[in-house]
Image: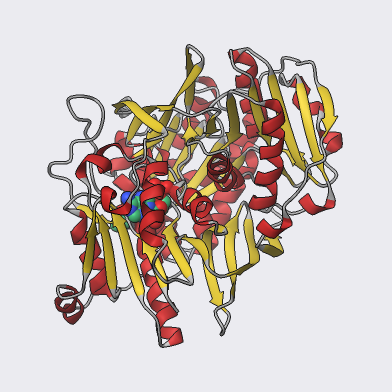
Amino acid sequence: MPGILIYAEVQKGEIKKGSFEVTSKAKELGGEVSACIIGSGVEALAPELAKYGADKIYVVDGPEFEKYEPEAYVQAFAQVAEKVKPGIIFTSATAQGKDFTPALAARLKVGSISDCVDLSMSGDKAVAKRPMYAGKAYAMVEAVGNPQVFSIRPNSFPVNESAGAGAIEKVTVNLDSSKIKTMVKSVEIAASEEPDQTEAEIIVSGGRGMKGPENFKMLEDLAHTFGPTATTGASRAAVDAGWRDHAYQVGQTGKTVSPNLYIACGISGAIQHLAGMGTSKVIVAINKDPEAPIFTKADFGVVDDLFKVVPPLTEEVKKIKG
Amino acid sequence: MNTVVCMKQVPDTETLIKINAEGTGIVTEGVKWVMGPYDEYGVEEALQQKEKFKAGKVTIVSLGPDRAIEAIRTGLAMGADTAVHINDAAFYEKADPYATASALAAAIKDLEYDVIFCGKQAIDDDSGQVPAILGELLGLPVITQVIKLEVADDKSKATVTREVEGGHAIIDVPLPAILTAQKGLNEPRYASLPGIMKAKKKPVDVKTVADLGVSVEPMTVIKEMSLPPARQAGKIIEGEDAAEKAKALAKALHEEAKLI
Ligand SMILES: Cc1cc2nc3c(=O)[nH]c(=O)nc-3n(C[C@H](O)[C@H](O)[C@H](O)COP(=O)(O)OP(=O)(O)OC[C@H]3O[C@@H](n4cnc5c(N)ncnc54)[C@H](O)[C@@H]3O)c2cc1C
Ligand SMILES: Nc1ncnc2c1ncn2[C@@H]1O[C@H](COP(=O)(O)O)[C@@H](O)[C@H]1O
């Protein structure tokens, strides 16, 4: 079994859940599991990776890594990879992972496989399953080069506590600053505690049937009732109407999501929308039109006025949650 | 301002995907092909920058089989000036992101450009990798998911806004650079009738992979394709009124689905 090196992503001072998911998967596959964490003041986070199976944790810590900048991060990670010589590299296909992973693979002169939802070993090589056409098809893909690089879609693998040796090593990297051409002037992140749609376990989504931007508060309330792993989403019709920011759009030209629960409120279920959320584990549709195509995909359907269903649903969920 | 737009022709988003008999790709008969929706934002931005600077040239570069010419003509009809069509059926069949980027890089390296636009991702393979590899091969910085672009008057640098998780980042970048277009960057225009007429006479430089002097072996290989398991329509929640249904739904999510 080849060694596996993981990119452990830090956001808002915490390691992302997706990074723990890929660490757990690496541990399950067997072999030596290493992780590399990059940032400023991130050393204290390193032991957490051991809980999920990391035998060795490389820490690249310095003020120059305060803000994510792909070139600097790629250089740092590539130098760690050079040392570790892994057969396989895993990243989580988060927003940052999608920016970082292809650039890293290109630097290592190999191909990478994006947004994988499953992995299996075939001898010394991993073969990945990934959606294409926004989830309308799946492909089994093999990466030819060495190392093999995979970004894994969040929520594809469970987080399992299974301790690794957890040796921590600080690494000093030599940055070629002449190649770092971009300068991050500012980063503005909403104060919201909600997870990104691609990582959320529960999404309460609204479409044109929401009638206006003010009504999305209702969906936020329901999402909050489910807890911190829930967020809201929107159809393109709701985004195009200017009711929600594009970051919320689910579908072929928005985010492709696979939460445990997707609740579609006032969404008809156009093919482009279904493509983006069709792999959700459980789908609920609330729509007053019994003929709406969303019902053909929904595990649970409610044919009624969403304005009369969502508020009592929130109350019922509150009661159950106690 | 001179720009290059990398554009891929892809199946329309309405397409119902079917897998071919060999299980290695999709059935292409009956598919309606269109310009990649994210690449469309790239074309539009290139045109807007050219209009702003009142000078320059927009070149579309596309790797694809014969049919790709239709999407190229659409770009020319929108207002692009010229195009390079890398048309090599044998190569296109097995081109992965690496091979694609290598061919594009070879075609682009002799062109004049301040910015290379790509789409955030091609909506067929959804890989989002070609721009990064292109950046590595051409030695250019790459900024992904751009939603706003301001180019300095002397075209030596740009300030771009990109989408990041939960918000956005503002970045300064020297030009030339590769930017990937995300929804929000602009509203793509439709080709006008005179535009369509003019497009027919605009030059398209057709190149084979051999012309470009690249012979690239793919780094990733699709072994097998399949359709996702069909989803069945589930249960319609019954009840006297909406409140009853809401209660029954919460119960089902709790007891049957075990999600609450
Ligand atoms: C290139 C391209 C890309 C696209 N990409 C995407 C994408 O990424 N994501 C996406 O979502 N779409 C996408 N679309 C758009 C898609 O085709 C649909 O137009 C869109 O999904 C419709 O959104 P909707 O379901 O909210 O609106 P509609 O189709 O108008 O449906 C509204 C629904 O709300 C119901 N309703 C109304 N009032 C109530 C009420 N009071 N209570 C309950 N139900 C109610 C109605 O019965 C109806 O079913 C794309 C289209 C194109 C051409
Ligand atoms: N065959 C191609 N011809 C031209 N540009 C391409 C091609 N494939 C990918 N691209 C460009 O790279 C972007 C991302 O594609 P991908 O990495 O395949 O998701 C696309 O939006 C295009 O701008």
Which image quarter is the N terminus of chain B in? bottom left
Vertical order, A76 against B41 (above or below): above
- Left/right placement of residue B64 relative to residue A100 reads left
Which image quarter is the C terminus of chain B in? top right
Work out whether residue B260 can be spotted: no
* Image location of residue A186, percent across then percent down: 71, 65
Residue at (58%, 55%) from the top-left corner?
A217
Residue at (51%, 54%) from the top-left corner?
B135
Residue at (62%, 37%) from the top-left corner?
A226
* Image location of residue A26, percent across then percent down: 62, 20
Q: Quadrant of residue B234?
A: top left
Vertical order, B53 against A287 (above or below): below
Q: Quadrant of residue A38?
A: top right
* Image location of residue A192, percent across then percent down: 69, 52
Q: Quadrant of residue A177?
A: bottom right
* Image location of residue B39, percent across then percent down: 37, 60
- Left/right placement of residue A266 relative to residue B139 reads left
- Left/right placement of residue A46 relative to residue B123 reads right
Vertical order, A36 against A235 (above or below): above
